[in-house]
């Protein structure tokens, strides 16, 4: 805690562990796990036992609400294989069990309905000959993932896929759904002025670019009614030009505020906004942190068969001079602030939205792991709650820690090794410096034991 702060830890804890109510949802505290998960499931999109263990351990650690990882509404829309989907009614029983596991700890569970669009890292054999559906024919400029502009019948089909995904989430007994409209996925590809180059009613100005999402919101309400929680994850600012300065910057904060206002849909639309930033994934601002070159060289090779620019990227990352230059660019484009990096954007949305509907809540993501930072963010009315991912991967019981002290003894260092390892390895904390031991082998064994803990208890005992 900052020595000049006028608030004690007890003051901060009282703010953080105060109940948060939405129009149709109650959460026991202001801490949400943001969308993160590894490749824990079956190749065909059915959920696996490891995911049950994964979700349950965060609920056990005291988090108020879990937002699921990227949950594809169709096979065509997945980002990685071995991610549980919601594309068919046969997935409902698994998600019902997920809900049961986390509800046992008075934890809520929101399913994040998602579609990759062109940003499909490893779509699997079903998508071997498919280009990513998108608002544009232009490939993604980071990996070079190929795209095709969606036809109007395809748009209508995807709208319905989102609506049916929401229906299935409600039938599974989950507590709400979130639309993933940030970080470069399909909804971002329509919303962003830096990506969407359509000339029909789904392009042009911000109202046209938001039409697709508004149709999804209305289709979801048709299926689940007004008493089921619906929230939208959205970029405060796209920062679409982070890699190439001649590429369009994308949406401004003013445009985002206007889009959020539109998605309220006269009180019949979304219940909450989840504010992020960055029009690609990964992006220097999301997840904000470092770019570990050794891990990048070791695990990026899986992308070589995916994007047209991936071989060039791999050559840059592997070059001792160019790799360091790219890392320096990454750090510069990230900026100096990590914890609370999106707070100014969340504040701008909050200030405008509350004028229209005081019952709408705003969540903010961005490396939160200290009680004083979280409490100050809520006190300032920049947001009503915070979402976190990497700090919880590092310390699964972070909420319980924050009841006692300002932050964990072994903090998340934002090294992003978890992110890069997830391309080929189980998701977990791979920051070797956080593990104690008298020898390299002992420290390494402890790190691997924690990473592999998601498989415990095993399916059969």
Image (cartoon, rainbow, N blue to C red):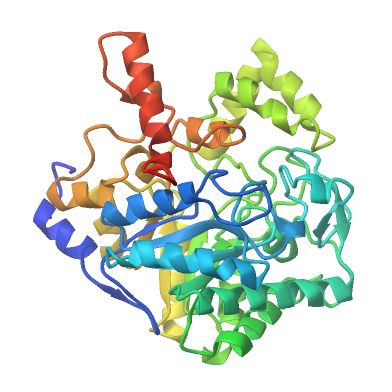
Q: Quadrant of residue 25?
A: bottom left
223 sits to left or right of 50: right
Judge whether 431 appears above or below 340 on screen: above
Please identify the quadrant where the N terminus is shown: top left
| Percent coordinates x, y for residue 134 in the rendering | 80, 60
Q: Position of residue 316 (x, y in %)?
A: 72, 21
> How far across and down, in percent of the image, does residue 423 sit?
61, 35
Q: Residue furthest toward the top?
A: 439
Taking depth in this image into account, of 47 and 233 the one nearest to the observer is 47
Q: Which residue is painted at 56% across and 79% down in the image?
A: 261
Residue at position x 39%, y 41% in the image:
393
Against 433, is 250 above or below? below
Quadrant (top left, top right, bottom left, bottom right) of the C terminus? top left
Question: Which sits in the foreground, 200 or 75?
Answer: 75
Q: Position of residue 451 (x, y in %)?
A: 42, 33
Height in image: 126 above or below 296? below
Q: Is residue 192 visible?
A: no
Note whether 24 is above or below 327 in the view shown. Answer: below
Q: Residue at x 61, y 18 (%)?
A: 324
Q: Give 319 or 334, whichever is nearer the viewer.
A: 319
């Amino acid at each position: 805690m900052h020595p000049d702060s006028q608030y004690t830890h007890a003051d901060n804890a009282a703010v953080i562990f105060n109940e948060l109510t939405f129009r149709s949802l109650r959460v026991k505290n202001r801490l949400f796990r943001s969308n993160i998960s590894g490749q824990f499931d079956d190749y065909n999109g059915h959920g696996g036992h490891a995911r049950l263990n994964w979700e349950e351990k965060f609920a056990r650690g005291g988090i108020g609400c879990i937002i699921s990882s990227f949950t594809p509404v169709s096979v065509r829309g997945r980002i990685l294989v071995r991610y549980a989907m919601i594309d068919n009614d046969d997935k409902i029983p698994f998600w019902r069990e997920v809900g049961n596991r986390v509800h046992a700890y008075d934890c809520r569970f929101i399913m994040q309905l998602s579609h990759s669009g062109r940003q499909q890292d490893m779509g699997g054999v079903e998508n071997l000959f498919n280009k990513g559906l998108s608002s544009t024919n232009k490939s993604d400029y980071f990996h070079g993932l190929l795209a095709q502009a969606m036809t109007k019948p395809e748009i209508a089909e995807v709208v319905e896929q989102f609506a049916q995904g929401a229906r299935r989430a409600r039938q599974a007994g989950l507590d709400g759904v979130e639309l993933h409209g940030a970080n470069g996925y399909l909804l971002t590809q329509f919303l962003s002025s830096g990506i969407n180059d359509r000339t029909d009613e789904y392009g042009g100005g911000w109202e046209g670019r938001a039409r697709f999402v508004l149709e999804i919101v209305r289709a979801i309400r048709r299926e689940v009614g007004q008493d089921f929680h619906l929230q939208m994850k959205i970029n405060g600012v796209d920062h679409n030009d982070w890699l190439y300065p001649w590429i369009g910057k994308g949406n401004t904060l003013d445009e985002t505020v206007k889009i959020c206002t539109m998605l309220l849909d006269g009180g019949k639309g979304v219940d909450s906004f989840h504010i992020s930033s960055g029009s690609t994934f990964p992006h220097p601002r999301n997840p904000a942190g470092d770019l570990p070159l050794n891990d990048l060289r070791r695990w990026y090779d899986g992308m070589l068969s995916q994007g047209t620019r991936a071989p060039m990227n791999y050559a840059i990352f592997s070059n001792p001079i160019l790799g360091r230059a790219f890392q320096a660019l990454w750090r510069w484009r990230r900026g100096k602030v990590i914890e609370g990096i999106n707070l100014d954007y969340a504040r701008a949305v909050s200030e405008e939205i509350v004028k229209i509907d005081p019952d709408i809540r705003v969540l903010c993501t961005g490396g939160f792991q200290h009680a004083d930072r979280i409490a100050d963010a809520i006190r300032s009315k920049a947001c009503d709650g915070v979402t976190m991912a990497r700090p919880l991967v590092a310390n699964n019981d972070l909420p319980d820690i924050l009841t006692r002290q300002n932050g964990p003894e072994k903090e998340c260092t934002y090294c992003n090794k978890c992110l890069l390892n997830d391309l080929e390895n189980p998701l977990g904390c791979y920051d070797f410096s956080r593990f104690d031991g008298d020898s390299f082998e002992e420290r390494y064994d402890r790190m691997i034991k924690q990473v592999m803990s998601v498989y415990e208890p095993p399916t059969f005992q």
